[in-house]
Each structure stands twice: as C-alpha cells, then as structure tokens.
Image (cartoon, helix red, strand yellow):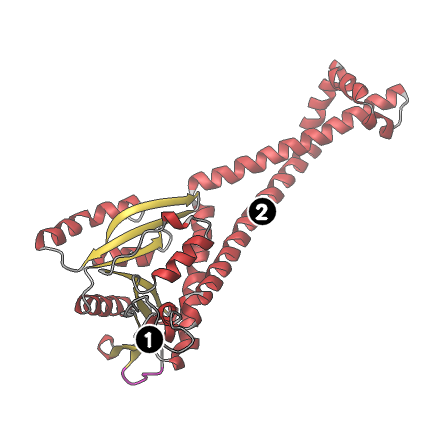
Amino acid sequence: MIDKSAIRIRPYTEADRDQVLETLFLGFTTVGDRIFQKTVRHRTTALSILAKSLTYTLVLELLLVTLSAVNNSTTRTGKGAGGVLEDFRTLQEALMEPTTIQGMVGQFLKPSFILLGAGITVLVTLATVYSIYSSNQKDTQIYFQGCLEEDLGDIVAYYQKDVSPVEKQDKDKTGNRSATTPKKNRSQFWVACLESHPQLVLGCISLDDVAAHAESLLSKHIKQGSPASTFEQPSEFDAELRRLSVHPNYRRLGVAKLLMQTLKDSAKKQGFKRVILSTTIHQSEALVGYIRFGFERERLVKFTEFFTLWYGQLKLNATAKEIEEQKDNQALYLKEVGLLN
C-alpha cells in the first residue's frame, strides 16, 4: 500500500514522456469505454436501439413476405419470378388481392417467420451496438492523435519554454524579433511520483497559459471549421487546466487532489485570476473532483446525443461568500449531469 505522504509533485522531464503518454492514453480509453457503457445502458438509448431494430426487422419481413406473395401470384398466372419483378403492375395486383393479403398475414404469423424476425432483431441490435462501440473507439483514437499533434507533440516546448513557440517563429532571418511583442509563456506541466521512486509517474497535470498560445488556439479554431471572426481572444488572466490523468494502478490515493492543488497554487502565484476547463460529463470521477475542488459550471454544450461538454471555472481570488455559494451549488452541478440523484 502506497503512503500518501510519500507522493511528490515535480516538473515534467523528457524522460517522463512514455509514461505520461501511457497514462493519458489509458485515461482516454477508459473514458471512451464508459461513454459506450453509458450509451448502451441508458434507458432512452436502449429503447432507441430496440425501436430501430424492430423497425428494420419489420421492413425486412415485409419485403420477404411480399416477395413470397408475388411469387405465389405468378405461379398461378404462369409468369416467371424475373418477369414479375420487372412488371410493377403485376406486383400491385398481387398485393391488392384479398387472398394474397390474407396469405401475407398468414405467412407473417407462421412460427418460421416469427423465429426469422427474432433472429433479424437480435442481429440488427448487435450490429447497432457494435457500430456505436466502434465509432466511440475511433473517436477516442482520433482525439488522442489530435493531442499528439498539439501540445503533447512537444511537451517541453509547449509548456516549459519561457516564450511561446509560436512567438519564437516571429523572429526574422537575422535573428531579431519582429514587431510582434513576444508573450511570456507561464504554462507548466507536472507529474506525480513517489519520493523513493522519482522516475515512476503516477499521474500528470498541466497549466496552459492560453494567452501565450493564442495563435495556436486560433489555428485550431479555424481547422475545426469556425471562422476566425468568431474566435475570442484569451485573457491574460485566464489559465486552463489540461491533461489531468492518474494511472489506473495509482488511483484513489489522493494523487489528483495533490496535482490540482499544485496547479492552483502556481496559477495564483503567477498572477492568473481564473482557471478554466472543459470536460465531458462522461468523465464522472474527474468531474466530481473538479466540482468539489471548487470549480463552478459556466455552461453545458450538447454536441450529440452521447457527447456533452461541461465548461467550468475556478475563481482564484474568490471571496468567502463566493466560495460558500459554490459549495452550496455543488449538489446542483452534480445533479445537472446525472451524478447525484
């Protein structure tokens, strides 16, 4: 059993990269699995899947019975099956014959068709659930790949260089800085480790100086299909909490709380007035931790039936009254996202 007092928080180093990426990837995968579990277990979603499956089943059964009825009709008229499918008038006559309709009903009620319908329903349901799971896993992979192309591509450059990497590109060929004033990068990236094993990464967290990375955020905004005119320039008093993840083997030891406290203390020391974050409501454990740590909900944004983002903020200079109000609203925030009955 790991003693909580033996856990230490230190700055990230290049030697931590593989462990950090593994921890983050496991965190993303776990969230993805939970989204799938929540999806298939949610009452309205389960009913939706079943309703679609039954609809597809009835359509397939109707098609089979119709073809059977048409075939019976053509047998009496002496036409071949191929000729009937090409003759829509014959198909219409076959469907309008009372005896044929009765035959269709009789065929539909036959045990063989009932078993066929049940089989089709099961297959369609399994196919629907599998498609949701596959889509979820694919989205997780795409998201993680996007992270590798952003800040996780070079953690040291993005979070630990004194000047934003984007601003460094503003130097001209002679090495002199351009007219653009370089923005000091106050971002940081920490890892949790054991005092006795400082090389072992238990978890990680980052503080993103969004003002220093405004150009990167604008580029991302445009890549997502939004016009540059709708981009809101980040405030120099805002920092964003990102990349909080604890390795599954070291959870429930208070690692996340220590990481968040480190981030909060550093943000205040560097002059930030607010820490913002965005997370999905499916990251239930993390969301509970954020809310109980003092984050309050700014807004909820629902993108799809299965994907809702929770935007929160932590006021670093909150008054005693504001802190009490946030504590009073914690139950409300949790209830809004279904984490409290």
- Residue 237 in the image: state x and y as whole percent: 22, 60
194 part of magenta stretch: no
Q: Amino acid at mark 1?
A: Lys
Is residue 177 something one can see in this rendering?
A: yes
The image shows a total of numbered marks equal to 2
Q: Residue at x 33, y 77 (%)?
A: 12
- Residue 340 in the image: state x and y as whole percent: 27, 47
- In magenta, the rendered stretch is 195-199
Q: Are marks 1 and 2 in contact (CB under 8 Å)?
A: no
Question: Under tag 2, what secondary structure?
Answer: helix
Along the viewing direction, whichever of 25 and 142 lies nearer the viewer: 142
Q: Residue at x 35, y 80 (%)?
A: 13
- Residue, disc 1: 161
- Residue 206 in the image: state x and y as whole percent: 31, 68
Q: Is residue 197 left or right of residue 131?
A: left
Along the viewing direction, whichever of 291 and 236 lies nearer the viewer: 236
Q: Amino acid at mark 2?
A: Leu
**Quadrant where the C terminus is found in the figure:** top left
Q: Main secondary structure of the magenta part?
A: loop
Q: Is residue 159 left or right of residue 18?
A: left
**Quadrant where the N terminus is found in the figure:** bottom left
- Residue, disc 2: 126
Along the viewing direction, whichever of 181 and 295 lies nearer the viewer: 181
Along the viewing direction, whichever of 221 and 178 lies nearer the viewer: 178
